[in-house]
């Protein structure tokens, strides 16, 4: 029986060594894929050029040539943090140095108000030019040249 037990123990050690080699190979593949993704993101102005800019663990597995569940197996749980560490510091640095491009509601409302005011000013200028032309051409003898046919002049009315 001792010969059988030693063969079983040797087989377990060989399997354990084989598993360690696979895990090491997978670790290298996953870290390499994550680093490649970071390089692509950096080369593309800080936006990952695939999958709508999302850098996910599943994408890392696919890039490493491993099944998508590899990273979620309990045997590979310890690989998740090195991968996150691979891209997280650069993401945090990018966020820290990049000001937010999103405008607040107040900023957007102010811009729209400014555009509206500019358009209204242009309309008033055009109406004044039309009025000048009417006066020069002598149109509407007996009519008030300040009052158009529809009775609606924007420049006479302040913005509400």
Image (cartoon, rainbow, N blue to C red):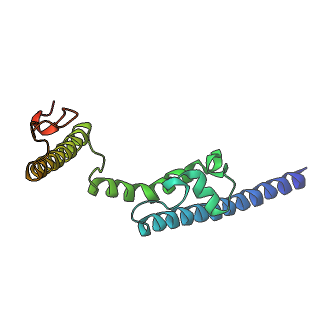
Which residue is at a point 25% across and 42% down the rendered structure image?
Answer: 108
- Report the number of discs: 0
Which residue is at a point 63% across and 63% down the rendered structure image?
Answer: 64
- Picture quadrant where residue 90 is located: bottom left
142 to 97, vertically: above or below: above
Left or right: where 141 falls relative to 51: left
Q: Nearer the viewer, residue 147 or 31?
A: 147
- Image coordinates of residue 129 in percent, x first then y, are 13, 51
Which residue is at a point 64% across and 49% down the rendered structure image?
Answer: 75
Q: Quadrant of the C terminus?
A: top left
Left or right: where 6 falls relative to 109: right
Left or right: where 75 falls relative to 116: right
Q: Which of 64 and 15 is in front in this view?
A: 64
- Image coordinates of residue 82 in percent, x first then y, are 49, 56
Q: Is residue 153 visible?
A: yes
Q: Which of 116 and 59 is in front in this view?
A: 116
Specify the farthest residue to the top: 160
Q: Which of 102 and 88 is in front in this view?
A: 102
- Image coordinates of residue 36 in percent, x first then y, are 52, 67
- Image coordinates of residue 69 in percent, x first then y, are 67, 48
Q: Is residue 55 visible?
A: no
- Picture quadrant where residue 3 is located: bottom right
């Amino acid at each position: 029986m001792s010969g059988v037990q030693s063969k079983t123990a040797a087989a377990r050690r060989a399997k354990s060594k084989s598993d360690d080699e696979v895990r090491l190979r997978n670790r290298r593949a996953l870290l390499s894929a994550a680093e490649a993704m970071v390089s692509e993101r950096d080369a593309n102005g800080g936006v990952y050029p695939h999958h709508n800019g999302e850098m996910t663990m599943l994408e890392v597995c696919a890039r490493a040539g491993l099944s998508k569940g590899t990273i979620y197996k309990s045997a590979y749980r310890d690989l998740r943090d090195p991968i996150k560490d691979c891209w997280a510091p650069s993401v945090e640095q990018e966020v820290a140095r990049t000001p937010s491009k999103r405008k607040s509601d107040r900023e957007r409302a102010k811009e729209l108000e400014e555009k509206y005011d500019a358009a209204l000013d242009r309309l008033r200028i055009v109406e004044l030019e039309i009025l000048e032309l009417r006066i020069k051409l002598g149109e509407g003898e007996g009519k008030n040249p300040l009052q158009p046919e529809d009775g609606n002049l924007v420049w006479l009315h302040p913005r509400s």
